[in-house]
Image (cartoon, grey):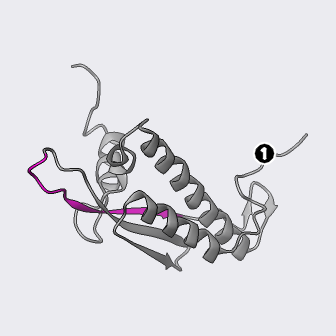
């Protein structure tokens, strides 16, 4: 029986190379800045925060610049019985972010979905504050915000 592999588990791509790919993807897509940060808690967390100017509702209005923050927690050193070093899990996490951004940005560029729709859940409600997803999703899970029930 073969075990299920996790995405990018054997990547040898350096974190700095993944971050450079992310920087280039966001810059080319029209972001006006990017930050990378790490939280060395248990479990650790990695963040990509970028500024995106949303399209104006009409030609006379000016777009609003919105901060977008993605967070990823790397898998544990021993995930599903497979032991990997902390450094390998960090490389894996950053590759995941890079590939996610590449796919979603391509979908937006192609016109499958608006950029704002893809990243709505990750938009900060206030600078460095909670994101829309961090605020709304727990309310949905608790039944405090019912969506699409048609009542």
35 left or right of 97? left
Which residue lies at the image location 19% right of the left edge and 59% below the top edge?
Answer: 64
Q: Nearer the viewer, residue 126 or 102?
A: 102
For label 1, the SS is: loop
> In x, y percent, where is residue 107?
48, 42
Q: Determine whether 6 is above or below 43 in the image.
A: above
- Horizontal side of 103 relative to 109 (left or right) equals right
Q: Residue furthest left?
A: 60
Q: Residue furthest front?
A: 59
- Magenta span covers which residues? 59-72
Magenta span includes 69: yes
User: Foreground residue, 30 or 90?
Assistant: 30
Q: Position of residue 89 (x, y in %)?
A: 68, 68
> Residue lying farthest right?
1
Query: Would you place residue 106 above or below residue 63 in this image?
Result: above
Query: Residue 43, can we see it?
Result: no
Q: Is residue 71 magenta?
A: yes
Residue 74 lies left or right of residue 133; in this view the side is right
Q: Considering only vertical position in the picture, is 98 above or below 149?
A: below
Q: Disc 1 marks which residue?
A: 4
Q: Quadrant of the N terminus?
A: top right
Q: Residue at x 21, y 19 (%)?
A: 151
Q: Is residue 8 visible?
A: yes
Q: Tell me the crowding category of disc 1: few under 14, some 14 to 19, or many 20 or more residues within 10 angstroms, Cα based.
A: few
Residue 12 in which image quadrant: bottom right
Q: Residue reaching furthest top?
A: 150
Q: Residue at x 55, y 60 (%)?
A: 97
Q: Position of residue 19 (x, y in %)?
A: 56, 71
Q: Residue at x 8, y 50 (%)?
A: 60
- Report the side of 39 relative to 3 (left or right): left
């Amino acid at each position: 029986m073969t075990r299920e592999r996790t995405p990018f588990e054997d990547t040898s791509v350096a974190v700095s190379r993944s971050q450079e790919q992310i920087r280039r993807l966001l810059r080319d897509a029209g972001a006006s800045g990017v930050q990378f940060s790490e939280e060395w808690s248990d479990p650790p967390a990695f963040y990509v925060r970028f500024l995106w100017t949303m399209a104006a509702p009409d030609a006379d209005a000016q777009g609003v610049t919105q901060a977008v923050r993605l967070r990823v927690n790397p898998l544990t050193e021993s995930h599903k019985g497979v032991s990997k070093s902390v450094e390998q899990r960090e490389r894996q996490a950053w590759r995941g972010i890079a590939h996610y951004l590449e796919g979603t940005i391509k979908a937006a560029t192609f016109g499958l979905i608006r950029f704002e729709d893809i990243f709505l859940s990750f938009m900060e409600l206030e600078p460095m504050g909670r994101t829309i997803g961090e605020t709304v999703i727990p309310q949905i899970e608790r039944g405090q915000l019912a969506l699409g029930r048609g009542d």
